[in-house]
Image: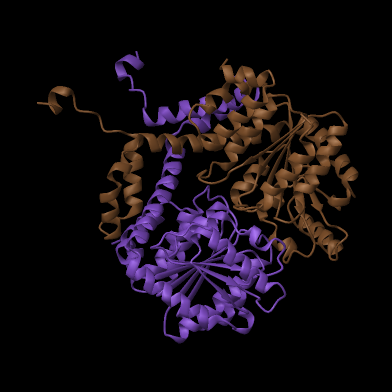
Chain colours: A brown, B purple
Amino acid sequence: MHPAAAQIRAGDIRAAARLMRDLDDGVPGAQDILKDLFPFTGRAWIIGVTGNPGSGKSTLVDQLIGTFRAQGKRVGVVAIDPSSPFSGGAILGDRIRMQRHSGDDGVFIRSLATRGHLGGLSASTVDVASVLDAMGFDIIFIETVGVGQDEIEVVYAADTAIVVCIPGAGDDVQSIKAGILEIADLFVVNKADREGAQRLVRDLQMLLSLAPQPEDAWPPRIHETVAVEGKGVDDLMSSLQTHRDWIQAHGADRRRAKMEWRFWSIFRRTLLEEARVESRLRQRMPSLLDDLLARRRDPHTLAREEVRALFHPAPRLSPDLSEP
Amino acid sequence: MHPAAAQIRAGDIRAAARLMRDLDDGVPGAQDILKDLFPFTGRAWIIGVTGNPGSGKSTLVDQLIGTFRAQGKRVGVVAIDPSSPFSGGAILGDRIRMQRHSGDDGVFIRSLATRGHLGGLSASTVDVASVLDAMGFDIIFIETVGVGQDEIEVVYAADTAIVVCIPGAGDDVQSIKAGILEIADLFVVNKADREGAQRLVRDLQMLLSLAPQPEDAWPPRIHETVAVEGKGVDDLMSSLQTHRDWIQAHGADRRRAKMEWRFWSIFRRTLLEEARVESRLRQRMPSLLDDLLARRRDPHTLAREEVRALFHPAPRLSPDLSEP
């Protein structure tokens, strides 16, 4: 076992934080450590939470952390928020939460950068969550702004997916992505004391009734909460537990599908990384760009030629032929 | 020249619509037609417009279409909206616009599906826009909900990038992505008659003043509009034209960088497609999944082995050895 993997298994938080940072930064070799941790994963309950900025999902997660902690569970949070370049959003939120939970070593919170991930955000996030899983955390929240395809995939990776909406946010139900609708196990209408909450609940019910629902699937539930006051959180917890029981009883296909998704997302990322290493394109790029800009060559044909050359390298000439 | 390419060059709108649909659906062979069209591209002015749902970006684009039409320009629109599974959002918006411009063959509007693009949304969108470019459209709007990494890349592909915000949408400036901030040439505060518009303008000014700004870069501008009433649209048009002049005078590096981005995004998509064809993984997936679920193998090592096998196939045994 890699020494860092052994340290992490032994509960060394600093070693775990270092590995997570390396995974987030794409440091080569970080995945070798994951390999040794992999046999110890698959035990945590991963809960994905997504919602637009301002939907109060961090506050909601905070309430749920409190409830799980009262049950003696260890809780990890992996937060992704591409929207906070400056002081706002997740970073500030994290600081507040960090403060509140700073004396509690049963809670570990980690924010991820999301830049330059080249479509690998989802794979990296699941990797980071799996470090917490291997350390024996019982519950892992993956919290993300529910917007792009990547974020949808992150939530898909979770065992239980929560989508948080708020009334009066403009287009309400229209702004819920088709993909999100299909993967949500629980909808939470937060800030449910605001005007328009009942309409939003009805709209969601209508959307769900329109969506095709296989008979053996989990029927998504809709909850109302006022997270800042803790209202509705107990009911939500109860549905969460029901969903957890349901996936343990009926979730074999689902676990299989999610593992397959995870494998392909790692495969894609690995493919892109290896191609970057193997390809000689970067050296030739200046002159190729001249050709492309002058429209002497087209990018599709060029890309195809280069990819085929990667997969089917021309046989090398034997030394006596190439070096006379 | 491919017959379809010749038809499109001759102005055949139905042939163009068919190719765009095939590009959007990833139909094999569609890119062969693009190859023949590529020499005729690079002339249109591509304007990317992004903003949250409800920001009024479609109305704004509609106003700009009217102004460009009054100048005798032919205008294309490629709209991407992953948020409208049902009747709302872009589809409805498109119908309204289609109606308004239905008698005008100087306007062509096309909505793209965004599902299943596997990170290739941005490349597909630019491909679709380039069909309009090759047909001689003068102005091409690419309109997208400004949310995920993919959407940011779509806007990056444009010659001029407009980011539309509205006051009172909750988190305002916080919800502007770091990536968006860096690529926006023009900010539009739409619905500027609403409360909070001035604060949003000030917040944007502050954000821009914090962002590092190279000396030879275009200094982003902030405009206020009330798009439904056409207010502020003339000033915006004037800034658009100034930006167009600026990129024509100073934009050589920028054009080069955008072409390089475009090539790599086509390369990535091609790589993933070819890997899917070449890899024998899918047949073996059921038993591999058994191993992964039982934690007998880990997905990172498996992915690496498979990718390396793709790039460095083992030499085949000669027939007399493999078939005794």
Residue at image coords 30%, 16%: B320
Left or right: A249 as drawn, with respect to B229: right
Q: Quadrant of the N terminus of chain B?
A: bottom left
Which picture quadrant has residue A128?
top right
Residue A49 visible to an observer of this rendering = no
* Relative vertical location of residue A290 with respect to residue B248 in this rendering, above or below: above
Q: Whole-percent x and y of residue B193?
A: 68, 79
Task: Say which quarter of the image contains residue B206.
Answer: bottom right
> What residue appears at the point 38 percent right and 71 percent down from the top-left corner?
B246
Residue B257: x and y in percent read 37, 55
Specify whether B20 is left or right of A163.
Answer: left
The quarter of the picture where the C terminus of chain B appears is top left
Q: How many marks?
A: 0
Side of A308 relative to A175 (left or right): left
Nearer to us in this view, A302 or A5: A5
- Residue depicted at 47% across the width and 28% down the height: B304
Can residue A32 be spotted in the picture?
yes
Residue lying furthest bottom = B70
Q: Point out residue B276 in the picture as x, y percentages from the top left corner.
A: 46, 39
Is A282 rendered above or below residue B283? below
Q: Residue furthest left?
A: A324
Residue A291 at x, y = what percent?
A: 26, 55
The answer to which of B205 and B164 lies nearer the viewer is B205
Q: Against B96, is A321 above or below?
A: above
Q: Residue furthest top?
A: B324
